[in-house]
Amino acid sequence: MTIAPPAPAPPTTEPAGADSGLGSTRSVATCGIVVATTVLLLNLLVAADIHDWIPLPLRAAIVVIGALAMPGLPVTAALRIPGFALATSVTISTSLAVTIVATQTAVVIEAWSPAVLQTLLAVAAIAVCAVLLGRAGNAPRPKRAPRHSLRVRAASLAALAVALVLFVVAARTLDTAAAHRFGIVTEIGPAYVAGLVVVAGVLVTTLRRTRIDHVVATASVAVLVTYSTLLVGVATGHTSVPTAFVHRGFVSTIAEAGFLPSGIDARFSWAGFFAASAHLVTTGGLPDTEALMTYAPLAFGMIMCAPVYAIALVVTRRARLAWVAVVVYQAFNWYQQDYFAPQAVAVVFYATIVAVLLWQLRSAPLPAIRPGFRGLVLDGPRRTPGLVPGWSSGRTLALGAVLLLVVLANTMSHQITPILTVIALAAFAACGVTRYRTLWIAAGLMFAAWFSYGATDYWLGHLHALFAEIGQVGTAVGRGVQDRLAGDPVYQQMQYLRMGASGVFGLVAFGGWVATGVRRTRGRAWLVAGVLCAAPFSMVALQSYGGEMIIRCFVLASPVLAPFVALALAYSARALRRAPAVRGFAAVRGLAAAVAIVGLVATMLVLTTNRGLNTAFEASTDEEVTVSGALVERAPGDATIMTWSHAPHTVGPRRLLEREPRVWFIDSYPCLDDLAGCAEDRWPSYILVTSQAIGMLELQYGMSREYLDASLAGVAEIGYVPMYESASVLVLRRADAPPLALDDPAPTGAR
C-alpha cells in the first residue's frame, strides 16, 4: 500500500485558537475554573438550603452551563481539539457523558447523593484546569477586526435584535387555542413573517460576503432556530411537546426516591438522561424540570450546529457550504425530537462521534488501496490510517477513550441510537478509514451488556415480541407512515407536507452525493459519508419502535444528509449561472440574494407548518399543567381517574412510586367508539378531559365535535358532575366521590 498525504484543509476555515478550537489553553482553563467554581458555590448553597435568593432562571442556567462545560472544557484543552465547531461538540458531549455515566452509576449502585457527586465533579474540573493553567504559556493577543467589519457586524446584530422583537410580538399575540387541522401556521400573523424576512436577509447577506463573519452567522442561526422551535413555547409558557411532561415526572421520581422504579415504564431501562436531569434539578435547587423544558429545543438546536458544521466542513471542504448545511439542517428539522428527551442528547452524541472520525479521516495520511469494489472489499478492512499530523499515539488513544465514554453514556440513555453507533463505527472500520478499528466491537459489547443486565425491565416477559419484529420492514413502514394517515381528512392531507419535506430533503441529498461522486475532487470522506446517510434506515429491519422508526431514521441521518444537500444547491446554482437562458438575469445585482431570501423564508414557513401541525393537541395551557397535576396529587389513594388522552401532566412521583391513584386511558377502539358507555363500565371516581384530549380525538382519531359533546352529555346522565371547568380543562366527579379543591393547584413533582 502507498501512503496518501492528508487531504488539504478547506480554503476557508473557522477562526482558530492558539491551542485548541476554543481558544488558548489559558483562556479555556480560566473559563473552566470560573464555571466549575460557580457550579460548586451554587451546589453548596442548595445543600445548605440558602439558595432561594438566587432567581430560578439563573440557577437553571448555572447548572445547565456546568453540565455542558465541565469537565469537557479541560479535556478539550488538554487534547487540543482543533476547530471551534469540533471542539465545542467534543466539549459538550464529554461533559454530558461524564454526568450521565456518573449519575446513572450512582442510581444503579444505590449511592444517590447529588450534592456529593456535584462537589467531586466541580473540584476535579477545577484541579485539572489549574494544572492546565500552570502549564500554559502566554496567549497571543487577538487581532482586532477592521472598523468596516465591526460596523457591518453591529448593523447585522441590530437587525437580528429587531427580528427577535418581532418574534416576541408574534408569540405573545398567538392564539394557540385557535389552531386546528391546519396547525399553527394559520395563526402566526404578519410580525412572524416579517421577522423571518429580516433573519433570512441577514443570513443570506452574511453567507454571500467574501469573508464570512462567524459571529453574525451563529447569531443568525440562533434566531432562526428560535423562530422554528419556540413559537408555541413562548406563547404558552410551556414546552410544545407534551411528552416532556412525562419526562418531568420521571426526573422528579428519581430525584425524590434516589432509585429507578421497576415494572413501570421501559424508558427506565435507559435512564441515563433522566438520572442526569434529576442530578441537575437537585443540585440547582429546582422544583422540577419546568425551567429547562420550554427552551430545550433552542438549546439542542444550537448544540447540534457544532457537529453538523464539523461534519459538513469535511464533506464539502468549504466553510460557506458548511454554514449552508447548518441552515438546511435546521430548516428541515420538523421532527420535534429536539425537546427535553434522551433522543436529543443521543443525536448529539452520535453526531459528535461521526464528526471526530471524519475530521481524523480528512487530516491523517491514508494508505492507498487497489481501485474498484474489489480493492475496497479486500484491502479496506485491513487498512489503518496514519496519525493526524502533530498528534502522538497517546493523544490519539486518549481521544478514542473520550469517544468510548460517549458511547457508554449513549448506551445508558437511549435504545436505538447505540445500535446505529455500532453500525456507523463498523462502516468506518470496514472502509479502513479509522484508527479505532475495534471501537465498534467495544460499542457492541457495551450495548449487549446493558441490554442483558441493565434493561431487563424492557425485555423481560416479551422477548419473543421483540425478536418477532426483526425483519418486518413492512410492519415498521406501515406503523411509521400508513398509521399516521388517519383521522380528520384535512389533517391527514397535511401529513403529506411533512412526508414531502423529508422526501425532498433525502432525494436532494442523494443527488448531491451522486453529483459529488462523479467528480475527481469528491474527497476521501465521500464513500463513508454516503454509507452514514443510509445506515439509519437499516434499523427499519430491526423494529418499528412504536411506529416512530421512520422518523428516527431521518433524525439520525440528517446531520450527514445536510452537507450533501448543500453541495447539491451549490452545483445547481453554478449550473444555473452558466445556463444561457438565465445568464442575463444572473447579471442583475442582488437578484440571486433576493431569490435565496425568498426561498429560505418559504422553506421556514413550511417548517413552521410542519412543526406546528399538532399544536391543537400538543400545546399545554397553565390550567392543563397545574389542574392535571393537582388532581393526581390530591385524589384519595383508592380513587380512580379516567382520562381522555395520554395525560402527560399527571405523571409524577405519586403515580410512579405509590402507584396511586389509578389512572385509566382510552385503550381500545370499543371504548373509543362509546366513551360514555366505557365510563359507565369502568365507573372511575373522576374523569379528566383537556383541550389536548379533544384535539387528539378530533384530529388523530377522526371523532366529530358532535360525538364528543354527546359523549360528555352521556357521562353527565350516568351520575357525573363538573368539579372543575375552564376553557381547556374539565374535571368530572362521580356523585359519591369526594370533591377536590383544584383552584390553587401545585404542579406535579413539586412535592
Image (cartoon, helix red, strand yellow):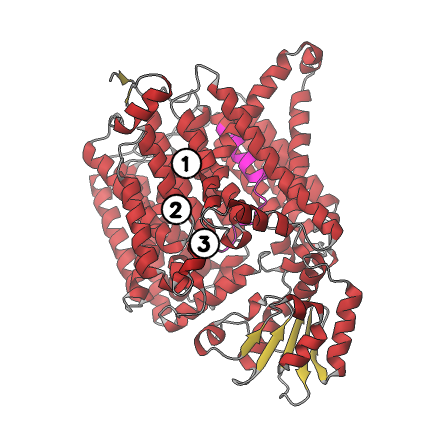
Determine whether 533 is above or below 626 in the image: above
Q: Quadrant of residue 700?
A: bottom right
Q: Where's residue 218, x and y in %? A: 51, 37
Element type at mark 2: helix
* Identity of the residue drawn at 23% across and 43% down: 132
10 Å neighbourhood of mark 3: few (<14), some, or many (≥20)?
few
Is residue 126 or residue 702 the one in the foreground? 702
Mark 2 residue type: Ile
Snapshot quadrant of residue 526: top left
Front residue of 72 and 347:
347
Q: In the picture, which quadrant includes the N terminus?
A: top left
Q: Is residue 577 left or right of residue 384?
A: right
Mark in the foreground, 2 or 1:
2
Tag 1 secondary structure: helix
Q: Residues within 10 Å of mark 2 (few under 14, many from 20)?
A: many
Q: Which residue is mark 1?
A: 85
User: Which amino acid, mark 3?
Assistant: Ala
Question: Would you name the residue on which mark 3 appears?
Answer: 468
What label sits on residue 419 in the rendered view?
2
The magenta region covers: 322-341
* Secondary structure at numbered mark 3: helix
Sequence-wise, the earlier of marks 1 and 3 is 1
- Mark sitting earlier along the chain (3/2): 2
Residue type beneath disc 1: Ala
Res 286 seen here: no
